[in-house]
Image (cartoon, rainbow, N blue to C red):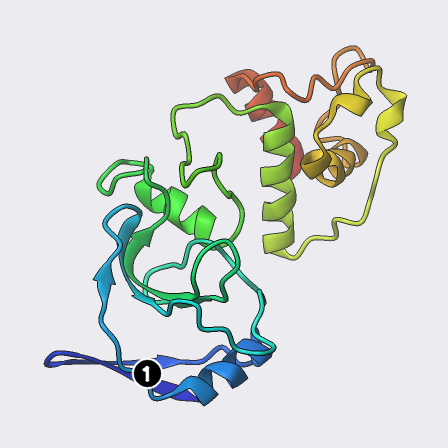
Amino acid sequence: MTKVMLTCGDYQFFARLEEEKAPRTCAIFKKMLPIEDRLIHVRWSGEGMWIPMGDTRWEGLDFENHTSYPSKGELLIYPGGISEMEMILAYGGVSFADVPGGKYYSAAVSWAAGEGIVTGSGSGNFNPTGKLTREQLAVVLYRYAQYEGRDVSRRADLGAYKDGAKVSSWAKDAMSWAVAEGLITGSNQKNLTPGGSTNRAQLAAILMRYCA
């Protein structure tokens, strides 16, 4: 196991490289050492620091076992693309611009985002008070099942439902899996209503099926 020392003023921190989970990234990162730069507080998205690396690009460095939101104590390398290459070091919750610290859901959102179970509503926001659609719930359950190590290979024919074609492209796999597993059964076996909201009763029934 390779350890890395981070020095910030009079403070020193030790970290391990996740070489089994991200071997290519760790190999390139070690070639970049030592790194000496300024730390900037990411005030817009949580409790963390980031190191801007401008237009620096390292051959072979790409997304690998990635998440958009590191958990406390993790170091994330963004290889560049939409914006400059950068490193993010989280010392607390680093998630969405509309999820302030100290709320009853802050830690839960940070964890779920860090594990890739939720990804937000775009533009750096989570929309914590927004409604959850049926296809969004299918995606969350699908990702959580993957997180638990469940077999998520089963698929159902969405074409069997009148509105099966209305399922968003990003939710098709998840919805097909959820239907195959009997988690989402549709209304009267005719419609999935993918863009419809999930009420509390429906959520309870779906969660009970998932945990059965």
**What is the residue that sits farthest to the top in this orientation?**
188
Q: Name the quadrant of the C terminus.
A: top right
Seen in the image, is 21 located left or right of residue 194? left
For the residue labelled by badge 1, is the local secondary structure a helix, a strand or a loop? loop
How many numbered tags mark residues here?
Answer: 1
Tell me the kind of residue under disc 1: Ile
Above or below, 52 against 105 in this view is below
In which image quadrant can residue 183 be found?
Answer: top right
Q: Residue at x 82, y 44 (%)?
A: 154
Between residues 23 and 142, which one lies in front from this camera angle?
23
Q: Position of residue 195 (x, y in %)?
A: 64, 20
Q: Quadrant of residue 139?
A: top right
Q: Residue at x 27, y 59 (%)?
A: 48
The 10 Å Cα crowd at callout 1, few under 14, some 14 to 19, many 20 or more, is: few
Q: Is residue 208 visible?
A: no
- Residue furthest to the left in view is 10
Q: Position of residue 63 (x, y in %)?
A: 57, 64
Tell me where residue 2 appears, x and y as whole percent.
44, 89
**Residue 136 visible, this angle:** yes
Query: Does residue 93 sit above or below 184 in this rendering?
Result: below
| Residue at image coords 49%, 63% | 80
Seen from the viewer's position, the closer of residues 175 and 80 is 80
Q: Nearer the viewer, residue 81 or 73?
A: 81
Whole-percent x and y of residue 5?
29, 85
> Is residue 84 left or right of 208 when viewed as pictured?
left
Locate residue 38 relative to residue 62 in the image: left or right.
left
Residue position marked by numbered label 1 in the rendering = 35
Horizontal side, residue 16 vs residue 103: left or right = right
